[in-house]
Amino acid sequence: MISVRDHAVRRGISVADYDRDLKKLPREADCEFVRQAAGSHEMWYSPITRVHFTVPHTIKSRHTANAILGQAGLPKAF
């Protein structure tokens, strides 16, 4: 079985790219960083869904990244 990291590398995506891009997309959609949350997570607020959602510092899966975008009311991007 292939690891998530190996799959990302084969597709030309580094795992760090999910982190960077995921934080950029909500910011462009006027989501607001609220505070540092427990452990290695950040708390954000989406004016689209009117919901607070957490974003981990390290995102290893495109599925996780897309789920977080869904919580923010944004379309899948990965």
Image: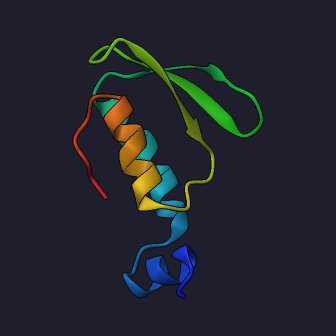
Residue 12: image location, x then y, percent = 39, 81
Where is the N terminus found, in terms of image quarters?
A: bottom right
- Indicate the quadrant where residue 72 lies: top left
Residue at (66%, 36%) from the top-left corner? 41
Vertical side of 43 occupied by 70: above or below: below
Residue at (42%, 74%) from the top-left corner? 13
Vertical side of 32 occupied by 75: above or below: below
Give the left or right position of residue 22, taking residue 40 as reference.
left
Residue at (41%, 56%) from the top-left corner? 63
Residue 61: image location, x then y, percent = 49, 61
Q: Nearer the viewer, residue 19 or 65?
A: 65
Question: What is the residue that sits farthest to the right in this orientation?
Answer: 39
Residue at (61%, 31%) from the top-left corner? 42
Residue 15: image location, x then y, percent = 53, 67
Residue 7: image location, x then y, percent = 46, 81
Vertical side of 54 occupied by 9: above or below: below
Q: How is the image coloured?
A: rainbow
- Indicate the quadrant where residue 45 lies: top left
**How many numbered circles does the render carry?**
0
Where is the C terminus found, in terms of image quarters?
A: bottom left
Question: What is the residue that sits farthest to the left in this orientation?
Answer: 75
